[in-house]
Amino acid sequence: MESKLRGTFDKIHADADLKERTAEYLRGEIGKRRRTAWMGRQRFAAACACLALLLFVGGFACFTPSAYVDMDVNPSIALSLNRFGFVLEASPYNDDGAAILENMDVRHKSCEQAVELLLTEMLRQGYVKEDGLVSVTIQTENNSAQEKMLGKIRASVDTLLDSHHSTASADVFAVSEEVRDCAHDHNLSPAKYLAITQLQEVDPSASYDRCAEHSISEIKELTKEHCGGHHEEGGGGNGSGEDTGTGEEHGARNENKTGEETAGDTKDGYENREEHHDHKEKKEHHE
């Protein structure tokens, strides 16, 4: 049987044209399969590249600072945020700030959560004084995000102060990158840097180092005191409506003072403020 079948098939012969067409067909099919496999590999490689790009861009956005929030009650703390508003790093400007952060980690929390946690701890430890000041500054190049952050943080701080029945006030505002850079050059929060800069306008002898350990409220109070003195020297009043003499009389009194005496008055003012500050800290520690 097998020999008959083999003999029958042996009699079948394909002509040259059929062989050529068959070979052409087979070559085409093989080429299609190779192209399909190559295109599949290309698509897979492209998909992997897109995924890697997305991961890189997402990771870059997640771990690159795009906004900065600085809190100053006198514990001074800086927060760096990613573009999604989550805290990447929290760092202190002074020892009080370091003490607050010692047992608290606000990384990966939203900006509002971090501010609330930090302010709650400052309230608990008694840093927020009655009629004191809570200063928060924001610096970012994204104007729309800046306005949203200002509104949310201002609302959070006000709500928290109200819930603790605190009479302290909140000052939440935006600063430029230049201001923040200048503040960091002196290891100060932007709010304190601006307060000291304002004091220097009426008292050139004021220094960033000397004022660094004072609260912003104390610095502003010094500015008011010097502004009152300048107003008196201008000839007319002390801000309370009292007539304290003409400008010439004040000028004559100032001319009778030597440069050393004038500098001594300013120095004594700072030393008295610092002595009062140290006395208050000792009293609080004793209590």
Image (spheres, rainbow, N blue to C red):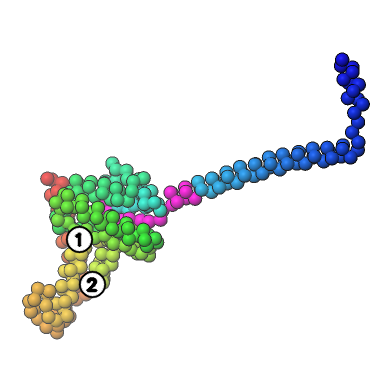
- The residue pinned by badge 1 equals 217
SS at badge 2: helix
Please say whether residue 238 is visible from this viewpoint: yes
- The residue pinned by badge 2 equals 202
Q: Nearer the viewer, mark 2 or mark 1?
A: 1
SS at badge 1: helix
Taking the spot 7% from the left edge, 79% from the top edge, the residue there is 243
Height in image: 114 above or below 246?
Answer: above
Please say whether residue 95 is visible from this viewpoint: no
Left/right of residue 184 with respect to residue 263 in the rendered view: right
Separation of residues labelled 2 and 1 (CA atoms)? 16 Å
**Within-10-Å neighbours for mark 1: few <14, some 14–19, many 20+:** some
User: Measured from the top left, where is residue 4 in percent x and y?
Assistant: 89, 18
User: Measured from the top left, where is residue 119 in percent x and y?
Assistant: 24, 50
Bounds of the magenta segment: 57-76
**Type of amino acid under label 1:** Ser
Taking the spot 40% from the left edge, 56% from the top edge, the residue there is 66
